[in-house]
Image (cartoon, grey):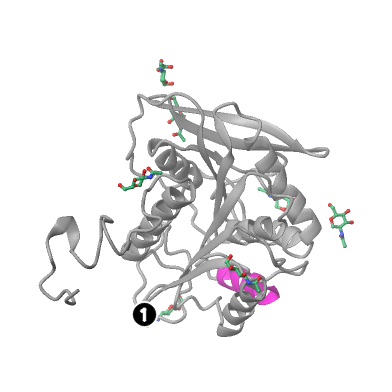
Amino acid sequence: MALLVQLCVLLAAVSACVAQMDYSYPTLWNPATLVNSTVSYKDGSTSLQGYLAYTNSTMGPRPAVIIYPDWDGISNYERWRANLLAAEGYIAFVADIYSTAVKQGPSLPAANRSVLMSEFRTNSTKFRTRVLTSLAQVRTYDLVQKDKIFAIGYCFGGGAVLELMRSWPATTGLLGVGGFHAGPLTTTGTKAQPGNPLIVQVYQGADDPGMTQDMRTAFTSELRAANMTWNFYAYGRTVHAFTLMENPLWNGNKSQSNGYNPAADRASWWALRGLLMESFGLTNMSNPYTATGGAYDYQTGINGQRLANAVAA
Ligand SMILES: *[C@@H]1O[C@H](CO)[C@@H](O)[C@H](O)[C@H]1NC(C)=O
Ligand SMILES: *[C@@H]1O[C@H](CO)[C@@H](O)[C@H](O)[C@H]1NC(C)=O
Ligand SMILES: *[C@@H]1O[C@H](CO)[C@@H](O)[C@H](O)[C@H]1NC(C)=O
Ligand SMILES: *[C@@H]1O[C@H](CO)[C@@H](O)[C@H](O)[C@H]1NC(C)=O
Ligand SMILES: *[C@@H]1O[C@H](CO)[C@@H](O)[C@H](O)[C@H]1NC(C)=O
Ligand SMILES: *[C@@H]1O[C@H](CO)[C@@H](O)[C@H](O)[C@H]1NC(C)=O
Ligand SMILES: *[C@@H]1O[C@H](CO)[C@@H](O)[C@H](O)[C@H]1NC(C)=O
């Protein structure tokens, strides 16, 4: 963990970790039906301000997705992801970790980001209390189906959702978590406990210099020991922060820690979208491979058309 922080500090020195411009992400939703607001809430005496987005083209309670921001805090990047999820019919909430005392976004100096992050990364009690506050906030909304909540996060926020996952059973209503280029994967606090029913997915750059084999092994060992349901995606030819469009494409230079990879970005987003549908019960794919009569019956083939290579019954 310390290594990750140091790495980011080091890279910040050569400004590889810092995007100065608050990139204007493309609009891929219908602004006419998007409703958004900033939301004030509290963790004890600390004032927080999140971002809420949903579409009013559908009415009534719906599943919720919480988004935990990366190390510069809440910026257009997280709001954009929230809007995309809102356009899919979910209610999306960008959680505040740092508080209103911090001017968040691309202009936050790297040194400040590192200090802020390590306050949480070195104190799992503080980190878990803060991330649970956002879950409680989301559960207050009438538009939220309170037993259908999912949490995702980017980089530092990926570490945040893993701390949220480890907070079970205090995670009422939460079905699972997804971490994009999440870090750190391990915790200084209590590990995931056996019986934890949350599903965990992480989407990592296989060439991310900050994600060592040791970290990966420690993480998967923790999830195995807790007998959890999890997937570890490792995208090839992909480094850190591969979902941020403002990053340069990776050219194979091992000293370049961050790089946008459109293929890995989209593949991981599709993986998440499928996972959300599965988790929220929006698919009817729980047993697609039934012996007889299922939509993908392997004996008779798709739609009753026997596949050319189908094994004889
Ligand atoms: C939906 O939200 C848009 C944008 O805020 C607003 O203009 C519109 O009146 C809303 N429609 C309904 C039915 O609430
Ligand atoms: C929030 O909604 C307002 C009014 O519709 C819009 O102008 C603004 O761009 C939206 N903010 C984001 C981050 O989408
Ligand atoms: C960064 O941290 C320094 C030292 O704590 C502080 O004086 C400064 O106001 C911070 N800057 C921002 C933009 O938060
Ligand atoms: C960790 O955070 C908790 C809650 O904010 C605080 O009470 C505690 O003193 C912190 N521990 C350390 C070692 O700073
Ligand atoms: C592990 O989880 C599976 C699936 O939920 C369950 O069937 C099995 O009994 C669990 N094993 C242990 C040792 O808890
Ligand atoms: C690789 O990246 C580092 C850090 O950005 C840079 O200093 C170096 O010139 C790059 N090397 C090549 C061959 O592009
Ligand atoms: C799923 O599909 C099967 C077969 O078409 C149907 O019998 C069942 O009712 C469906 N389940 C749900 C939850 O829609």
Q: Amino acid at mark 1?
A: Gly
The one nearer the camera, 262 or 110, is 262
Above or below 103: residue 155: below
Question: Quadrant of the image for the C terminus?
Answer: bottom left
Residue at 35 percent across and 67 percent down: it is 249
Measuring from the top left, give residue 244's x and y in whole percent: 43, 57
Please give left or right for residue 298 compared with residue 90 in the image: left
Please give left or right for residue 232 compared with residue 122 in the image: left
The one nearer the camera, 143 or 77, is 143
Which residue is the extreme one toward the front?
313
The one nearer the camera, 238 or 253, is 238
Measuring from the top left, give residue 27's x and y in whole percent: 33, 39
Residue 4 is a magenta residue: yes
Residue at 55 percent across and 62 percent down: it is 200
Residue 99 is a magenta residue: no
Q: Which residues are magenta?
A: 1-13
Measuring from the top left, give residue 280's x and y in whole percent: 48, 45
Tag 1 residue:
252
